[in-house]
Image (tube, rainbow, N blue to C red):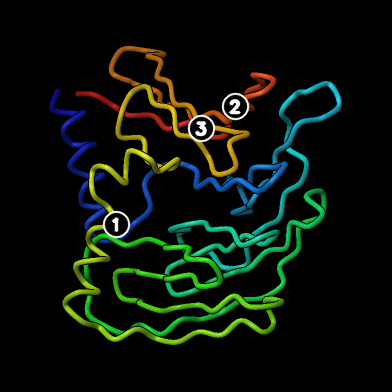
Amino acid sequence: MRGRQQVVVGLMIALIHGEPAAAAQVVALEDVVVFEAHTADCHALKAAGLNDAKRLLVQASVCMKKTFALHHLARHGRYVIANLWTELEIYDFADPKRPQLVRSMTLDETHPAWGGGGLVNDGDTLLVLGTTVSAAVTMAGAPSAWTVRNLDATPELKRRTEGLYSAATREQDPADFGSDRRVVPLEGGRFEVRWDTVRPQRGVIRHRQHLRALESGATLLIDTHDETID
């Protein structure tokens, strides 16, 4: 139990400081799912969709420009917004086989460190509520026309930011591995994220994160995280 407790405590510390959970960030578009992936020399966003045989496959990959930890993903129409600490990178997935970076934005650090954090998508406004960054992005028109304004660092804003990582919201986060087996529906109703666990050897629990297409039942493994137990 001590090893599992250490992992849970470590996860809670990460959440308090606004760090991403040890899992792939995921967001659904209409016909594809975009998820985070790591290779030796690339921190990437990958697009997966169904082929003619109804198999769920990776269709394209694009390396993100910043090397910062990816905190959250959001979508706005055909665009995917990656929040990397004080940076936003906006990718166009109009052609999911050829995603393109169309804009980068650097946000101001506007207050001392708070707990919690996340993105709140409200129509044409994206609230970036981070540990040291609080901003509203107006997403009208093409990304080249998007604007940013800093939010006032009020006690209410702090409470709202801290509340974004409650137990209830974490249970619906596709990139949180807080339970052994879990199903998280994705926006649009065509895909979901499923978790399972295996024990490949004594003292190791392997958490596996899958995409699943609801209509065909096709699945794709997108992330694996090993937990050690003393």
Question: If the image is split into quadrants, where does the C terminus sit?
Answer: top left
Residue 37, placed above or below residue 140: above
Place of residue 21 in the rendered image (x, y in percent of width and height, measured from the top left): 36, 47
Q: Is residue 22 left or right of residue 17?
A: right
Q: Quadrant of residue 11?
A: top left
- Look at label 2 and name its amino acid: Arg
Residue 155, placed above or below residue 1: below
Q: Is residue 35 left or right of residue 196?
A: right
Q: Which residue is mark 2?
A: 212
Q: Which residue is mark 1?
A: 164
The mark nearer the N terminus, 1 or 3, is: 1
- Look at label 1 and name its amino acid: Leu
In this orientation, which residue lies closer to the viewer: 85 or 213? 213
| CA distance for labels 1 and 2 | 26 Å
Q: Judging from the image, what secondary structure is the residue with disc 2 in?
A: strand
Tell me if label 2 and label 3 are in contact, CB under 8 Å. yes
- Look at label 3 and name its amino acid: Val
The mark nearer the N terminus, 2 or 3, is: 3
Q: Judging from the image, what secondary structure is the residue with disc 3 in?
A: strand
Q: Which residue is mark 3?
A: 193
The mark nearer the N terminus, 1 or 2, is: 1
Q: Residues within 10 Å of mark 2 (few under 14, many from 20)?
A: many
